[in-house]
Every structure is written in structure tokens, then in C-alpha cells.
Amino acid sequence: MPAMTAISAIFVYTHANMIRHTFLCLVFTACALTTHAQCCPEKPQTAKRQILWQKLQEELRGVDGHLDGVLALAVKDLTSSEEFFIHPDEIMPQASSIKIAVLAELYRQAQQGKLKLTEEYIVRTEDLVTGSDIMQGLTPGVTRLTLRDLATMMVAVSDNSATNVLIGRVGMENVNTMLESQGLHATRLRRKMMDLKAASEGRENVATPREMMLLLENLYRGKVLNKQMTEDFFNLLSVHKESYIPRNLPEDLKVANKPGELEGVRNDSGIVFTGKRPYIISVMTTYLRRERDGGEAITKISDAAYQMFDRLSRASELGRVVSPHDTGNP
């Protein structure tokens, strides 16, 4: 019996040591995992990116707060799908920015075979309206243009006569049907360009920043046009033009946008193809005391957005920019 008692005691002692050793190992492992999680998170840039986003939002709100007028905007990172809005669902007059929708329907009908972008149009005197710097200089009855030529004039110099010819060709209701099919219930083409009678009756071309953002995103992601048509659409929308979004951005940067101007109104919406970080920006202003202030506000917002997205595009996950020549200050 004494021998068995001694053996039992040894067994109990050994078993207790094993339990204690196992417990200490588990504690050590847990501590190591916790330390590792705190040191090296799985997505180290997420928190840093949120800080940049917060600072951008503060800056954009500051621009809004200093504008003597009403401002609404939408900004979307097409890589992460992060968004920022100010009054995104306010219905705003579009001026020439609505021409993005006209261009989309033109390309959609070309894709469906209902028309050809190479289809010719002969300039007619009855089609000419004010705000047509190119069309009014052409010879009626003689000058021939393709529908794509007209689209280029509509985008590059915002030629109103070219726009009206295209609206007549694709059909106003077809433009609105296309918008509705994309889930855009507030964006509408209600009149041709320079139809002051329609405008005075309240038939204004309208959209919201959120819906213009959604239209551009759907186009970008191939939900409206096939790959070839999408590429040509954005190439045409990227032709050089006097506008607010790209005003201070690098000259070689691709910006597919369309501004709009009316009395008391300044707008600009488009996609900025910033390296690995393309983004949508749509800024609309109305009730402006000074139209120039509206344009300057859009430019400030665009500059601030670009500064952030450019850094995100060029930086590593930790925020380090690696260039052939280190541009950092010593």
C-alpha cells in the first residue's frame, strides 16, 4: 500500500505539472498572437486610409461652408467603393452636364445597331441655336458631319446645335428610358439646349450627384455598353475641354468629364483616371451669388480629391511612395 500511495502521488504531481505547462503555453501563445495582431494588422492601410478620407471630408465641408450658394457632391473610390457625399440627393439643374446622358444613349443605340456613329448629317440652318461656336461657322447644306463628329463637338466645346441634332436623332424619351433602366429616377432630359420657353415653364434638365455618380459608375463597370463601346465612350468624354475638375490637375491625366453652366449654376461631373486609383467626382452648385465662386469651389474640391487619390495610387500599403529617385526631404 505505501508503494502504491507513493506512485499515486508521483502521478498526481506529474499530471499537475503537465496541466500547468499546457496552461502557460496557451497563455504565451495568446499573448504572442495578440502582440502580432497589434503590431502587424492584416490590412494595415485601412486605418490610415480612413484618416485621409476624414481629412478630405473636412476639407470638402469647408469649401461648402464658405460658398455663397448651394453645393451638392458625390465622390467615389472605384477601387475600394468608399464614398463621400454632401446633399447627394438634391435635384439640381444640370446645364450641359446632362450631355453625358445624351452621349451614353447615342453609344447604346450604336451598340444595338439602331444607328451608326459614322452616319452622316448635313448641317441645316434650322438646327442652329446660340451657344454653337463651331456649328454656326459651318456652311448649311454643304458641310457633312458624322454623328461621332457631332458628339465630339458636344463634349469638347459644348456645342448646343450639335447636341440638339443628337437629341433629335436618339430621342429624348429614349434617353430617359435608358436612365430609368439604370435605376436613376431623378435624372431627366426635359428639353433641348437653349429652349428658354421650356425652361421658363419649369422643364429643366436635372440630376442629383448620387445619380450622376451611379451613371458614370455603371458606364465604367460595363453595365451600359460593351467593352469596346465603353472604351470609346470614355475616350471621347476625355477630349480636352475648358472645365473645372481638371483645371489644376496634370495635363497628361485622363479626365472624362462634362461641365455645365447656367446663370446661378456651375457643375462638373466625371471620372478621374488616377493610376491605380480611379475615382468619380460630381459637384453641382446652384443659387450662386457669383458664378465664379461656384467654379472655384468645384476646382478646390477636385484638387483636394486628387491629392488624396494620387497618394493612394502611388503609395505602398504602409503609405511609402517608391520612386526611381527618392523625392523625400532628408
Image (tube, grey):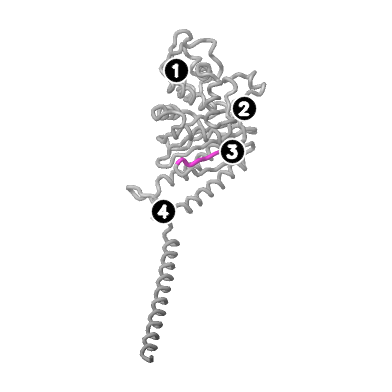
Q: Residues within 10 Å of mark 4 (few under 14, many from 20)?
A: few
Give the x, y percent position of residue 207: 58, 31
Query: Which residue type carries mark 4?
Result: Leu
Q: Choose mark 4 or mark 3, whichever is in front.
A: 3
Q: Assess whether residue 77 is covered by the magenta stretch.
A: yes
Q: Which residue is mark 1?
A: 115
Q: CA distance from mark 2 to mark 1?
A: 35 Å
Q: Assess whether residue 1 is covered by the magenta stretch.
A: no
Q: Which residue is mark 2?
A: 263
Q: Which residue is mark 4?
A: 318
Q: Which residue is mark 3?
A: 88
Q: Is residue 110 above or below residue 224?
A: above
Q: Residues within 10 Å of mark 1 (few under 14, many from 20)?
A: some
Give the x, y percent position of residue 21: 39, 76
- Image side of residue 288 versus residue 225, left or right: right
Give the x, y percent position of residue 182: 52, 31
Query: Which residue type carries mark 1?
Result: Leu
Q: Choose mark 3 or mark 2, whichever is in front.
A: 3
Give the x, y percent position of residue 37: 44, 61
- In the picture, the quarter occupied by the N terminus is bottom left
- Give whichever of 226, 53 is nearer the camera: 226
Does the CB distance between marks 3 and 2 fall below 8 Å?
Answer: no
- Give whichever of 156, 270 is nearer the camera: 270
Q: CA distance from mark 3 to mark 1?
A: 35 Å
- The quarter of the picture where residue 145 lies is top left
Query: Which residue type carries mark 2?
Result: Glu
**Magenta segment boundaries in residue numbering:** 74-78
Counting residues from the start of the chain, the first of labels 3 and 2 encountered is 3
